Amino acid sequence: MLTSMLAEWTQDMWGAIIGLFSFIPNWGWMIIVFTICLKLILSPLDFWQRKMGRDNAKKQAALQPELEKIQKRYGQNRQLLNQKTMELYKRENYRMGGSCVGMLVSLGLTLFIFITLFSGLMGMSRTQILNQYQTLENTYDQEVEAKGIDTNALWNTAYAEAEAELGPDADKNKIYSLALEKFSANSDIAEIQASVTTKYETQSKQSFLWVKNLWSPDTSTAAFKDYNQFVQSCDFYNNSAEYKEAIEGKTKEEIEEIKKQFQNKYNFVTFGLQENYKGQWNGYFILVVLAGVITFLSLLISQKQSTKKKSQANANSPMSQMGGGLKIMRYILPILMIVFTIGYSAAFALYIITNSLMSLIISFVSLKILENIDNKKPKEEQIVKQNKYRPEYSRENLIVETTADKIEEDRTVVTELPKKNQMSYRQDFISQKPNYKNNKKNKKK
């Protein structure tokens, strides 16, 4: 009960969201555009998580020399070592799990979206398959009513002829198949089934490029389902309101008879389509392979980025310890994605592929933005870092500051002079440049 309520809730929620893109006529492209928009909306959170991880790794690398000193000094006393390490972290305002917070938030949201969207798309697939058949059934009923045909009488006649031809002791399935062929050979029934086929090809069919039915896997499964496949794919006996109404208050034997009637009706309606698509695959495993390959590449790039951070961070940091988990997930997740795309609809496979591609693009763009931020740091910060431990009034500082001021002052003067005088001024400035080697020799003398 709880599972069915959850499935219904997720289907309604994601169905309403995806429905915002209903201006796109094809469900395949609709899911692709929806996934792109969803990833763009979530990209700031992904960028924040990456920035936190990057900053945390840099701070860890900056603390590494101090950590090594503490390790050498207190390595034999584990309790004191941990105490001094925590004191250093507190003094430098460093949190060991700082990068994990953003990662856990991002991971939790990703899992929520994946699980609920998976359930929602599966529910939508069942609904779409059932709606497709109901549309074809309505077309069949309208044509039968317009022609005034008694289909039950025609079926009984066809079955009697098939049984007489094969013998009463013949296999029931063979008798049924031959009877269905004889029933569909009737000119009026053949014309009605042709109308049903036209309806499916022009309005009900939902394909995507090479995939003939978007709500079935991109595999060697039948392009158009027989009755047993149809019942299983849409959970017909649980989702069909017509069937539930028909079996209400019936005995077990009566329910079995009603199931046969629904099977007959399905075959009457779709016999022409089953014959047209007989032996055709629904797809060629292209989406299945793409889902596995792109997921693998996405995880491989993430692992490489993690390895770069690991080289900057301590070997005992959370970022470093995460590397082993990524190696395992690099092989497990692609296999899981292949299993999902083989067992479920091509619509879900499109979501998996688009989501993985967008993750690759966002990861690359985020990395470039973070690198540009690092490269645009003021040069003054670099000078401060280089002179952090140099005395404020040391001779080197005075030389650097005096020379820098002199260069900037003379650069301004030179740019203001006429071009013909600039060269002579530069030569004069060079001749006035202090010779520190000669000064040292004079002092020794």
Image (cartoon, grey):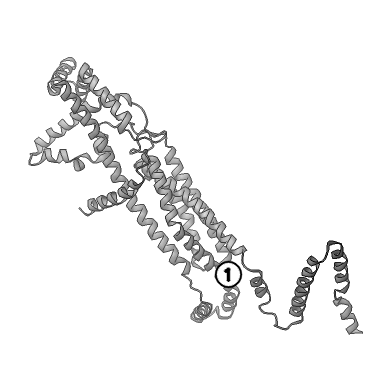
Residue beneath the point at 31% across and 45% down: 122
Q: Quadrant of the C terminus?
A: bottom right
Eyeballing the image, is 151 above or below 45? above
Observer-nearest residue: 50 or 63? 50
Residue 120 drawn at (x, y percent): 31, 48
Instruction: Determine which residue is flagged by label 1.
Output: 61
Say whether residue 315 is visible.
Answer: no
Say whether residue 33 is visible.
Answer: yes
Residue situated furthest right in the rendering: 445
**Left or right of residue 173: residue 338:** right
Mark 1 residue element = helix
Residue 349 drawn at (x, y percent): 39, 43
Residue beneath the point at 83% across and 64% down: 418
Eyeballing the image, is 165 above or below 12? above
Residue beneath the point at 51% across and 76% down: 93
Q: Quadrant of residue 137?
A: top left
